[in-house]
Amino acid sequence: MELAAGFSFQPLPPIEDPVALASAADPLGPLAGLAGKWSGRGFNVIWRPSHTPGQDRFLELNVTSERLDFEKIPGKIPNRGLLQPDINMRGLTYLQQISDANLNAGLHIEPGLWISVPATSDPEAASTVARLASIPHGTTMVAQGTAGTSAAPSIPDISIKPFPIGNPASRIDFPEQTLATPSNFRTSGAGLASARRSRASTFTPRPGCTCPPATPRCRAAEPRIRPSSKAPLMARTRTQRACAPRSGWRRSRETQTPASCSTRRS
């Protein structure tokens, strides 16, 4: 996404910033490091519906290529209130694109916003960040919370075995989960090229990029399970590269906003 030349929010009438925010080095706060273009590789696993009689599932496996573009929104974003006095927010637009790296086939596209929200008095809350996402399955979401910095998190392995709603202890075994078992209901052939690479492969940033503080090396992340919106027994996992923005996404980080910032195998 690209904002029109000269576009800038201008609250009318103006809203004065609190002294602490007015003197901040960057009013985007913890979101400031997101600006720029990011790219990397990952791995996607998802159970999707099959319409073959007697077989209601297909195990899709994808080596993925992902790109995230963040652009600062110029100006102050006004948010008018009644009990809560008017505030100025700052933000970025983003566009996420994920493709199958082997087949060059698009898998996901997601436009949205990241917003930095100053502290409020009604409700009384510290400053927060919010992600506003739009997913082309008729789905929109808002996720809001606090942000901070830390070393890379430890993410344990999580099973991709599905389970009935409300009964996570009752795992369901399917033969498609075992790669040694031949199946017509699991990705095979060209779609699996390079899929056997180790998740623990070490990656290093390209020139102009750097790992976050306290993260000496960028490493492949462990899979994360995400529920699928398509069926109650399905679950999704996506491996994302470590070296990360601090608010849930894990990526190689750029410091000088070069034209692109990708990870590469060292």
Image (spheres, rainbow, N blue to C red):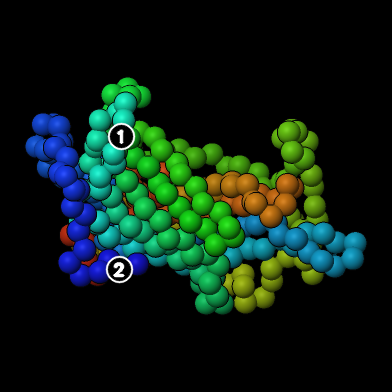
Q: Which residue is mark 2?
A: 2
- Name the residue rendered at 73%, 65% in the picture: 186
In the rendered picture of this protein, how many numbered marks are placed on residues? 2
In-front residue for pair 228/125: 125
Crowd rating for badge 1 (residues with CA inside 10 Å; few <14, some 14–19, many 20+): few
In-front residue for pair 251/118: 118
Q: Nearer the viewer, mark 2 or mark 1?
A: 1
Residue 114 spot, x, y in % from top left: 34, 49
Residue 42 spot, x, y in % from top left: 49, 60
Label 2, label 1: how many angstroms apart (C-alpha)? 29 Å
Examine the rendering and report whether any part of residue 107 can be seen. yes
- Name the residue rendered at 19%, 48% in the picture: 11
Tell me where residue 123 sits by quadrant. top left
Instruction: Please determine whether, in this image, residue 157 is positioned above or below residue 197.
Output: above
Q: Which residue is mark 1?
A: 81
Crowd rating for badge 2 (residues with CA inside 10 Å; few <14, some 14–19, many 20+): few
Tell me where residue 96 sits by quadrant. bottom left
Q: Amino acid at mark 1?
A: Gly
Tell me where residue 71 sits by quadrant. bottom left
In-front residue for pair 8/246: 8
